[in-house]
Image (spheres, grey):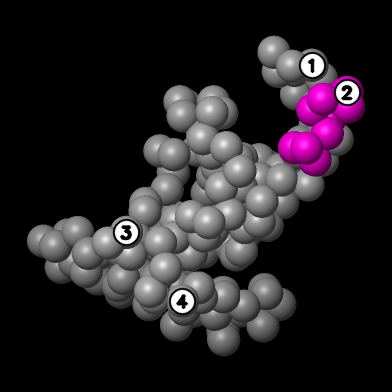
Amino acid sequence: MRDIGTMSNTATTATTTANASSSDAAWYAASLAPMCATDPPIEYLPDDVPLYVCAKCGTHLALQDEIISKQFTGRDGKAYLFNTSINTDLGRREQRQFLTGLHTVADLLCRGCGTSVGWKYVRTPSADQRYKEGKFIMEVGMLHKVNNW
Ligand SMILES: [Zn+2]
């Protein structure tokens, strides 16, 4: 399905400039979309608003305006709680014990490259945690911020 040779050539030439690297990757992910008929298409957010993209492949994942809280911790450090996300798929549901109790969560996977970028809260244990249900945790280390003028 994917032409790995072409992809690594693109990545090698693009590493000279950081900006070109992520946009080339996004372009490449977009060019794949029509060939994967069973996958939902990759969506794009406007170019003129601050947003977060996958650090690995450049796929648009969330708007900065959708951040509910920056006071979260992921598996590998700081994480943000988002109201919405795009171009993500959910992994298997599982129970996870946090300081705030036992939660049901599902891994949040980037649709562009399949990397787990965080999780979605499916069920929370108590009323004071309910605001997190249906919301998305994304690890800061898995994101790049773009259009932040
Ligand atoms: Zn990705």
Residue to which mark 1 is pinned: 101
Badge 2: residue crowd in 10 Å (few <14, some 14–19, many ≥20): few
Please check the rendered image and state whether residue 29 is part of the magenta-colored stretch, yes or no.
no
Identified by mark 4, the residue type is Pro
- Is 114 on the left-hand or right-hand side of 9? right
Q: CA distance from mark 2 to mark 3?
A: 36 Å
Residue to which mark 4 is pinned: 46
Identified by mark 3, the residue type is Asn
Q: Which residues are magenta?
A: 124-133
Identified by mark 1, the residue type is Gly
Check if mark 4's residue and mark 2's residue have beta carbons within 8 Å.
no
Provide the secondary structure element on which disc 2 rests.
Answer: loop
- Is 11 on the left-hand or right-hand side of 135? left
Residue to which mark 3 is pinned: 148
Compare residues 135 and 32 and report the one nearer the observer. Answer: 135
Residue depicted at 54% across the width and 28% down the height: 71
Q: CA distance from mark 2 to mark 1?
A: 8 Å
Q: Where's residue 8, x and y in %?
A: 28, 64
Provide the secondary structure element on which disc 4 rests.
Answer: loop
First in sequence: mark 4 or mark 3? 4
Q: CA distance from mark 4 to mark 2?
A: 37 Å
Residue depicted at 45% across the width and 82% down the height: 31
Residue to which mark 2 is pinned: 126
Check if mark 2's residue and mark 1's residue have beta carbons within 8 Å.
yes
First in sequence: mark 2 or mark 1? 1
